[in-house]
Image: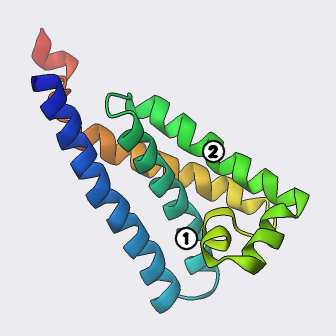
Amino acid sequence: MSDLRGSLRVRAVAVVAAGSAVAAGLGVRAFGGGEFAKCAGDALYTVLVYVLVVFVAPLVRPARAAVVAAALSWAVEFFQITGVPDELGRRSTLARLALGSTFNPPDLFWYLVGAAAAYAAHRVLRPGKAVAPRWQRM
């Protein structure tokens, strides 16, 4: 029963984190501008993917979640080379937001930044998984 409660708590936090990532992404685009907004949006996209990975698999380790989030973000970016996301984005705002439109190699770096930031936050916030530093365990 405690595992179930823990999973539900992790999923609840993931929902709040997803909402925060979306709000931050929309805020950066609305109030920021230029290259900063683009790079921050790319990183926040991967943060959102990371949070969705945690929602689906609440017991996932932070490193695995980061790798999966970065890989999915990269897959979407490379999918843009086909032109399919651009075509879908012309018909649907949701598709445009989820899939983007044009391949841009620098985005790959910012996806890694987002995965690293989400990993770091997850390590800090992960309940019950804190390990004392080695010098304290001696």
Q: Any mark on residue 62, and which? A: none
- Residue 93 position, x and y percent, is 63, 78
> What's the amino acid at mark 1?
Gly
Q: Is mark 1 on a helix, strand or loop?
A: helix
Of the 4 image quadrants, the one containing the N terminus is top left
Question: For mark 1, what is the residue?
Answer: 41
Marks 2 and 1, Cα distance to the nearest angstrom? 16 Å
The quarter holding residue 21 reads bottom left
- Mark 2, mark 1: which one is toward the viewer? 2
- Residue 126 position, x and y percent, is 23, 37
Question: For mark 2, what is the residue?
Answer: 72
Query: Do the numbered discs 2 and 1 sit on residues whose CB atoms are within 8 Å?
Result: no
* Among the two numbered marks 2 and 1 on one chain, the one whose residue lies closer to the N terminus: 1
Of the 4 image quadrants, the one containing the C terminus is top left
- Residue 109 position, x and y percent, is 66, 54
> What's the amino acid at mark 2?
Leu
Q: Is residue 98 above or below residue 69?
A: below
